[in-house]
Every structure is written in C-alpha cells, then in structure tokens.
Image (tube, grey):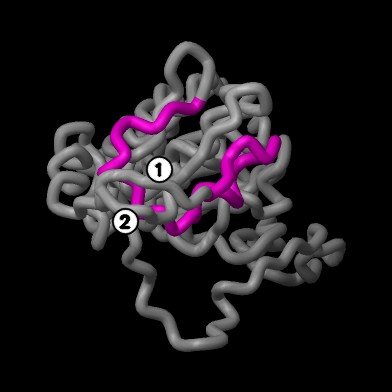
Amino acid sequence: MAVRSIIKINEDLCNGCGLCVPGCAEGALQIVDGKAKLVKEQYCDGLGVCLGECPTGALTIEERESVEYDEAATNQWLKSIGRPTVSAAHQQPDLPCGCPGTNLKTFGKRQEEAPANAPASVGRSELTQWPIQLMLVPPSAPFLREADLLLAADCVPFAYPDFHRKMLNGRALLIACPKLDNAELYVDKLTQMILRNDLRSITIAHMEVPCCFGLGRIVNEAMQRAGVKVPVMSINVGLEGELR
C-alpha cells in the first residue's frame, strides 16, 4: 500500500452515461446499477484520462492510500473482457506532425453541376466533411452530431460506380477495413461516437467477401457496449461493383 493518485467517483453527480468506460484504456471503470464503479484499484493508473470524458464532473483524481497500479494484472483483465492491452490501446497512428489529414473540416455541398458536355459518369462530390478514416475521426467531431452515418469498407468506393450519388448523399462518412485494421479499437471508438452523438442511423456498406462482414459485427458490439439502439441498414457490394 502507498499514497498515490487514483480515481474518485462522485455517485451523486454520476448519471450513468458510460462515456468514461471506453475512455479508460485500462478497463478500470464499469457501469454497475446505473453508476460508474472502479473495478479494482490496481487497474487504475491514476493519470485521469477518463476525466475529460465525463459530462457531469463526477470523476476526479485524489491522493490516498491504495494498492499500486499493476500493469500485468490490468492486461490480464483487459484480455478477459476482450479489450486490447494497455500498450495497444494507447498506440496512436504513426502520422507526420501537422498532417492535414487530421484536421477536422466541414463543408457544404458543391453547388456547381457537371458541365453539359461531360460524360454521364461525371458528377459532383457528395463528401461534406474531413477526415473520413475512422482512425482519424474523434468521437466529438461536429459532423457526427445527429448524423446519418455511412460506415464503408475501404474497397466499396472503388468497386461501386455510383458511390457518391447512391450511398454518400446526405450522410457523414467513415471508412475502415475490418480485416486489416484493429477491430477492437474501432469498437471502442464507435461506442463513444454512439454515446455522444445521438446518431439517426448507421448504414454499413461492405464487400461480399466474408471478412468484410466484420464491419457489421463491429457496429453491433459498439451498440451493445453503448446500450443504445441505432437503426442499421447493410449494403452488400459484389466484386464487380453490383449490389448484392
């Protein structure tokens, strides 16, 4: 036992929203009987990353006597609940400093239409925000608020010829690959997005190959963790670009 920093939960302020749960990479917090609870003191590192996730100010850091933080035990706990280890959860994309791809941007639809003599396949872009890669979009991105969300597998826009007009129009876009990317990190991020943004709907666009159906599993798991039901529609695209 030693005096150290550790989380303190004011249950009178806690509304049970659950935003702190995915915000804690150590898995030290859970919602029990409608309130945030510390699972075990040895799982809390005392750094307070979860504080910024709490909308009511129910979480604070205090100095008191407690067992030491145990990373090995924490990793065993994380594995038992199907979450990435501490080092994996804290890993960030290896991006150059100042990369413009990380800058949030919202823009209206382009009003100009394609020239009259343009080929029939030429149209306008329906993209209204940046970035689009799920790894780069924070759960607090303003374009997610009350949005109709399109979660598309990376290959879909290349395979489906009318992606902008038929799928993207009127939706906020996130792209991801359920085969090559870290699915557990995506579950955590989508959980936070669902909790924060009162999404109107989620449309999942995936390829017909079996591994691509993992996007649906990611969304379902995120909704279960968030405890929120969002209307979901799935679109299956064939390898030659046809709708299946």
Vertical side of 33 occupied by 38: above or below: below
Q: Quadrant of residue 131?
A: bottom right
- Residue drawn 21% across the image and 36% down it: 82
Q: From the viewer's perspective, is 159 left or right of 178?
A: right
Under mark 2, the amino acid is Ala
In the rendered image, is residue 207 in sight?
no
As drawn, the residue found furthest toward the top would be: 33
- Residue drawn 42% across the image and 81% down it: 95
- Residue drawn 49% across the image and 27% down it: 36
Along the line of sight, which residue is nearer the eye, 37 or 238? 37
Label 1 environment density (alpha carbons within 10 Å; few <14, some 14–19, many ≥20): many
Q: CA distance from mark 2 to mark 1?
A: 10 Å
Q: From the viewer's perspective, is 183 left or right of 170?
A: left
Q: Which mark is residue 188?
A: 1
The boundaries of the magenta stretch are 36-61
Q: Quadrant of residue 206?
A: top left
Vertical side of 196 occupied by 75: above or below: below
Along the line of sight, which residue is nearer the eye, 135 or 162? 135
Under mark 1, the amino acid is Asp
Q: Position of residue 35 (x, y in %)?
A: 52, 21
Cβ–Cβ under 8 Å for marks 2 and 1: yes
Q: Position of residue 33 (x, y in %)?
A: 47, 12
Q: Which residue is mark 2?
A: 89
Vertical side of 95 occupied by 127: above or below: above
Along the line of sight, which residue is nearer the eye, 115 or 53? 53
Residue 52 lies within the magenta run: yes
Q: Position of residue 152 (x, y in %)?
A: 45, 47
Nearer to us: label 2 or label 1: 2
- Residue drawn 40% across the image and 43% down it: 188
Secondary element at tag 2: helix
Label 2 environment density (alpha carbons within 10 Å; few <14, some 14–19, many ≥20): some
Position of the C terminus by quadrant: top left
